[in-house]
Image (cartoon, rainbow, N blue to C red):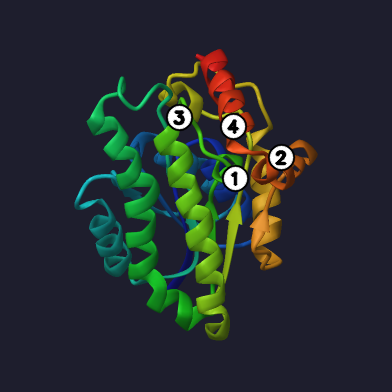
């Protein structure tokens, strides 16, 4: 049976960088994203670097049958997941009342439901392997986010779920880490309606995530500014914090 590290949202950004790092450390890969052509290009790059060709699964995890398609592809390839990287996610900027309801529900479907569904389905493999889970959250999880409310709330779920799962799976030898990047130079911001992003380098964020996961750290916050934000933001009263976050989001449109 083939033991793999499965990475969702692997076609670009932090997910693609995590795939490259995992491959460089000798992990066999299963890569999941909507865009097959981008996954094929990444697979070709890894093969050219001397790594085995990854298992490619083109699937929309927000669709009702998306997670099922991934599980079926793993079974067909006789692959067992020893490392699970839940990276796929997106957000939308704007007020809840103004944004398309379907788009906002899609955030819940991808950032929460798909992450939970995939994790639950793969837990038997992960327990058998005493494996590792890396969930990609955000510094957004440490505060409410007027102007991007559903996204911030979805990342709060990722954080709380990951922390609880850490305790539940401790006796089984499965580690659960959550990576909380700040603003990062990826395609996420274009999809969210924020234009091109200027932020941390996706490679550096991915390296911090990989190192933290392998060290079985529960919480990984790359960058000094983000670490300070994670400590300070929960202490600020909502009456002060919410207008500041709201103003910040308006300024990014």
Give the mark nearer the N terminus: 3 vs 1. Answer: 1
165 w.r.t. 15: above or below: below
> Residue shown at 31%/34% (left/top)?
104
Label 3 sits on residue: 148
Residue 98: where, in percent of width, then height? 31, 20
Label 2: how many Cα within 10 Å (few below 14, some 14–19, many 20+) = some
The answer to whether residue 143 of the structure is visible from this angle is: yes
Q: Do the numbered discs 4 and 2 sit on residues whose CB atoms are within 8 Å? A: no
Label 2 sits on residue: 229
Q: Do the numbered discs 2 and 3 sit on residues whose CB atoms are within 8 Å? A: no
Label 4, secondary structure: give it. Answer: helix
Label 4 sits on residue: 239
Residue 224: where, in percent of width, then height? 79, 40
Q: Residue furthest right?
A: 224
- Give the CA separation, mark 4 to mark 1: 16 Å
Q: Nearer the viewer, residue 149 or 166?
A: 149
- Give the CA separation, mark 3 to mark 1: 14 Å
Label 1, secondary structure: give it. Answer: helix
Q: Nearer the viewer, residue 120 or 69?
A: 120
- Give the CA separation, mark 2 to mark 3: 18 Å
Front disc: 4 or 1: 4
**Could you say which disc has been placed on residue 142 in the image?**
1
Give the mark nearer the N terminus: 4 vs 2. Answer: 2
Give the mark nearer the N terminus: 3 vs 4. Answer: 3
Give the mark nearer the N terminus: 2 vs 3. Answer: 3
Label 1: how many Cα within 10 Å (few below 14, some 14–19, many 20+) = many
Give the mark nearer the N terminus: 1 vs 2. Answer: 1
- Give the CA separation, mark 3 to mark 4: 18 Å
Label 3, secondary structure: give it. Answer: loop
Q: Do the numbered discs 1 and 2 sit on residues whose CB atoms are within 8 Å? A: yes
Q: Nearer the viewer, residue 33 or 199?
A: 199
């Amino acid at each position: 049976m083939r033991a793999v590290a499965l990475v969702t949202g692997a076609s670009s950004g932090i997910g693609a960088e995590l795939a490259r790092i995992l491959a460089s450390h000798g992990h066999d890969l299963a890569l999941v994203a909507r865009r097959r052509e981008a996954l094929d290009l990444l697979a070709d790059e890894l093969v050219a670097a001397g790594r085995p060709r990854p298992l490619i699964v083109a699937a929309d995890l927000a669709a009702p049958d998306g997670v099922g398609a991934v599980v079926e592809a793993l079974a067909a390839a006789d692959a067992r997941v020893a490392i699970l990287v839940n990276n796929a996610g997106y957000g939308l900027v704007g007020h809840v009342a103004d944004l398309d309801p379907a788009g906002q529900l899609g955030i819940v479907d991808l950032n929460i439901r798909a992450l939970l569904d995939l994790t639950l389905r793969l837990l038997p493999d992960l327990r058998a392997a005493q494996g590792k889970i890396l969930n990609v959250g955000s510094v957004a999880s440490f505060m409410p986010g007027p102007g991007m409310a559903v996204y911030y709330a979805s990342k709060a779920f990722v954080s709380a779920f990951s922390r609880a799962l850490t305790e539940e799976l401790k006796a089984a030898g499965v580690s659960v880490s959550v990576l909380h990047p700040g603003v990062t130079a990826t395609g996420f911001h274009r999809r969210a309606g924020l234009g091109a992003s200027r932020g941390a380098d996706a490679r550096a964020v991915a390296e911090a995530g990989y190192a933290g996961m392998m060290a079985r750290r529960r919480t990984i916050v790359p960058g000094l500014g983000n670490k300070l934000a994670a400590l300070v933001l929960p202490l600020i009263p909502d009456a002060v914090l919410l207008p500041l976050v709201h103003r910040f989001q308006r300024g990014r449109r």
